[in-house]
Amino acid sequence: APTVTYNTITVTAGTGAQSDNNAVTALKTYAVAGSCASVDPFTDANPDVAAAGSTTGTATGLSANTTYCLGLRACDAVGNCDSNTNEVQATTSVVPYEDFAAWSKVDPSNKLQKLDLTGGDGIKETAKCSNCLSRNEAFYFYYDFGAANSVPGDFEYEFESVHTTNGTTGSSVLQLVGLSNQLGMLTDAGNVENYVRLYNPALNDTHGAYLAGVSGAGGTAATLNPALNTRFYWNVKRVGLTTTYSMYTDAARTVLYETLTNTDVGTPKQFRYMLVHQSYQDIQTATTRTVSVEVSNLNLISGFPAPPVYPPTWGPPAGIDVANTTVHTTSLDLALYLGRVPASGRSISSLRIYRVPEGTGGTPNGVCDTEDPVTDDLTPVVITTSPDTVASYLDTGLTPDQMMCYAALIYDDLGTPDTNTTVVALTPTAPIVS
């Protein structure tokens, strides 16, 4: 099967006899967007070229989350290429910071969720905030682009939002998506943000107002009042000092519901972080309304740093060696696989071990099936000393006969995790009573 990333597809070449005595000097990879039933990959005028002896060909510079038809042809030094017509179809993955795969979260009350809604509905992973107390409790998903000026000028992105439920008392302010120069709760005092917010005034149980603007920079906000359980399709675009927030009622973004504009004061504000479902710091300690809202299909179109190499080429992935793990009464001496290697040009920064009791987030059933240690363990063990060679970790203070669900991930210097998704179940042995 082809190997895919968000912007490459690699396919394996077949073998066959040459028809002349000219040596093969290149393997060309042709790729055209679309299904093989409707497009011809060999119409690609700029195929990628691999050196002689290559057994795989890689199409590069592709669009994320897009289906391509590909074909390979071997060529000699005088430009003769074979007449292979075999085709293969594959779809690139989504960009990691668009499906929240590489995001972090602050969530002390466990209100934030990442939902996999890719089951045929065309929606990427969704970030959901369920019954969130939106004032004066720090919670948010965030992505760190790496530097204070990572997003310095013009930019454009899209997302979808659905406001599903309201509490019955109080008011609320909750950021849907925004760019910020610092982490923490959003506030109009000192924190510069370019944002789309959800706002519910008191005594408004059936609607949620959307605010859009630039806080802490002299910007102003406009208000919309869409009904609950209505999906809206946003386009946010900054050109110069002016950001335009366009809100549509259809996925093609042709039926405009409303357009808001906002102008930075002075110079375009620069941002390091993107945040989703960011809570609000309210110095007035107003009565807080709980809300539930979803953000999905995030698409960073332009003006953002190139995404990290993802999935990185780890070999083998980090993980727990169950066969060589030693089980004790109140501890587990976890054996870890060695030989971890990051993607080209990257270095390993940490090994993180996530663990939660079986049954976390649901009903215990004796297996680790629905548990997600990476999401639910807010305080994982972080090993930064020789993380590429550490061979074991002793997890202590456990309860006998309490099954634990573990995941172990390696992170590179960009904060990108490896591709290991294995969750293992281990149970400390109860003491023998004679």
Image: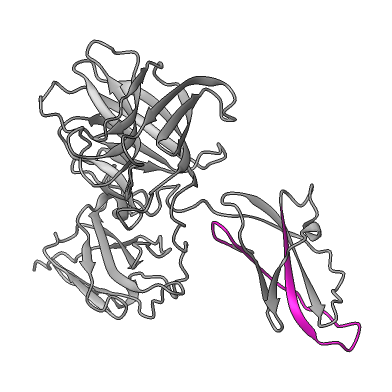
- Nearest the viewer among 354 and 301 is 301
Task: Please provide the residue range marked out in magenta.
Answer: 4-32
| Image quadrant where residue 241 sits | top left
In the rendered view, would you say 322 is above or below 272? below
Residue most extreme to the right: 19
Judged from this view, the residue extending furthest toward the top is 203
Quadrant assignment for the N terminus: bottom right
Going by the image, does 152 lie left or right of 28?
A: left
Pinpoint residue 406: horizontal percent, then vertical percent: 29, 61
Residue 324: x and y in percent read: 30, 78
Determine the image quadrant of residue 356. bottom left
- Judged left or right of residue 77, residue 291 is left
- Whether residue 366 can be seen here: no
Q: How many marks?
A: 0
Looking at the image, can residue 365 be seen? yes
Q: Residue at coordinates 54% horizontally, 54% vertically from top-left?
A: 93
Task: Give the residue at x 26% y 64%.
Answer: 353
The percent coordinates of residue 283 (x first, y second) are 10, 29
Residue 12 sits inside the magenta stretch: yes
Quick check: 318 left or right of 217? right
Residue ID at (53%, 41%):
119
